[in-house]
Amino acid sequence: MIAAALRCRHFGVCGGCTLQDLDYSLQLESKKSEFERLLSALGVPLFDFVPAPDPWNYRNKVELSFLPPRLAAGGPPGSLTLGFKEKGKWYRGFDLAECLIFDPFLARLGESVRLWAIHENCAAYDPRRHHGFLRHLAVRKGATIERKGAFLATLVTSSQRELPGQSLIERLSSIKNDLFELSLFHGVNDSWADTAVPQRIETLSGRPYLYEYVLGRPFRYSLGSFFQTNPRAFELLLGEIAAHVGRLGVSCVLDCYCGVGVMAVMLAERCGCPAVGIESVVSSIDDARVNAGNQNGDRLTFVLAQVEDVLSDWLKKPEIRSGAVILDPPRSGLHPKALKALAADPPAHLIYVSCNPKRTVEADLPHLSQSYKITRAQAFDFFPQTRHYEALFFLQRI
């Protein structure tokens, strides 16, 4: 086994990049072997395992945690920790000096926020006692419509005290430059759940959305909207889907869990077929309609709903039944009602995008195999330096 020279000083303590000590070629071999073992249970060969365009600096989203001094890993007395959790220890963390799978700006931003917090005497939240003020710093990276770099930073706190927001704005203005925009938000989370998802949010400065250029086309996504964390690898997967839909020559595509509409919009534009997107997050649907532009309501339709609640009705439409349905569910996989609908009225073609291949192969695909056969299984390394990867399945009605 070929060991790689360690590039990140936090490796071994951080629970994120668990494969960084392996040469990238061996990371791919390890993931490929795992996926092939999963597929063997279905009797399906692996078509291809596509490497990431760049195994470093690929992520567009990270979430840092604040922790009080006694829960910090080696922090000086009276300090405040802002960084990632220690490997296997949800209640301990370390100050982040670098993150080589995100933008280098993250370390500078995090240190500025940490020093501001110490100066303002803001106490870090203790997840074991459900007490304290500062909880998380969530950072997203994208661009402006003019292709200028842009970041959205959300400081998540409890409601224990008032946020000294103006002093934070002034502190962060010192690290901004002409190469990027930085927008700042304050979110409040008073729940026991140790999550960076706030219950309410306010804008401190800037605009609440970013753009990401996918295959040369801009797509807007807002603060609360999902976007693939590795846009360059996502382009490779999207290209495979577009080529497949083009070969099929279908008259309509139904994009389930469509997010901000990237796949639906790209397929409508590149393959010339109408597309319908279904999504349950309001901000994502709003973004999708913006991204559709003047095609919205013409060749593109976006529906705000839970997929499992409306899929059965859509599958009864002749253009959908003879077309292709894209499934890109969360890690939990397809809802039982969605599986039942796909079995009752199977469309001609399914395209399943999975961020949790193990669950997909062991739970969803066996159900679908009663009505469909898998014609291709492919994987894409969306998450270099980690054990995770994305899978793509093409299925055809039996």
Image (spheres, rainbow, N blue to C red):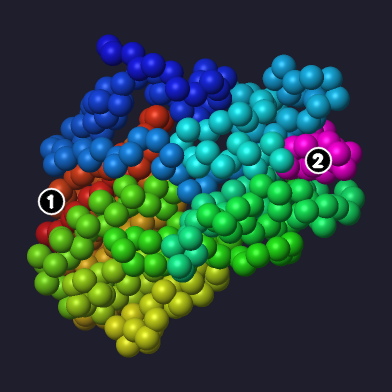
Q: Position of residue 138 (x, y in %)?
A: 62, 47
Left or right placement of residue 47 versus residue 188 in this view: left
Q: Is 26 one of the magenta-colored residues?
A: no
Q: Is residue 59 above or below residue 69?
A: below
Helix, strand or loop at mark 1 = strand
Query: What residue is shown at x 48% (from left), y 72% (from top)?
Result: 287
* Disc 2 packing (10 Å; few <14; some 14–19; many ≥20): many
User: Mark 1 — residue?
Assistant: 375
Left or right placement of residue 318 versus residue 164 in this view: left
Query: What residue is shown at x 15% (from left), y 61% (from top)?
Result: 243
Query: What residue is shown at x 79% (from left), y 19% (from top)?
Result: 76
Helix, strand or loop at mark 2 = helix
Residue flagged by tag 1: what amino acid is it? Thr
Q: Is residue 178 above or below residue 99?
A: below
Can the viewer see residue 360? no
Q: Quadrant of residue 295?
A: bottom left
Q: Is residue 165 above or below residue 64?
A: below
Of the 4 image quadrants, the one containing the C terminus is: bottom left
Viewer-closest of 306 and 59: 59
Residue flagged by tag 2: what amino acid is it? Ala
Q: Decide which of tag 2 and tag 1 comes sooner along the chain.
A: 2
User: Mark 2 — residue?
Assistant: 117
Q: Position of residue 177 (x, y in %)?
A: 60, 53
Q: Position of residue 320 (x, y in %)?
A: 24, 75
Q: Which mark is residue 367?
A: none
Of the 4 image quadrants, the one containing the N terminus is: top left
Q: Which residues are magenta?
A: 113-135
Q: Is 134 one of the magenta-colored residues?
A: yes
Left or right placement of residue 271 versus residue 186 in this view: left
Q: Position of residue 335 (x, y in %)?
A: 42, 56
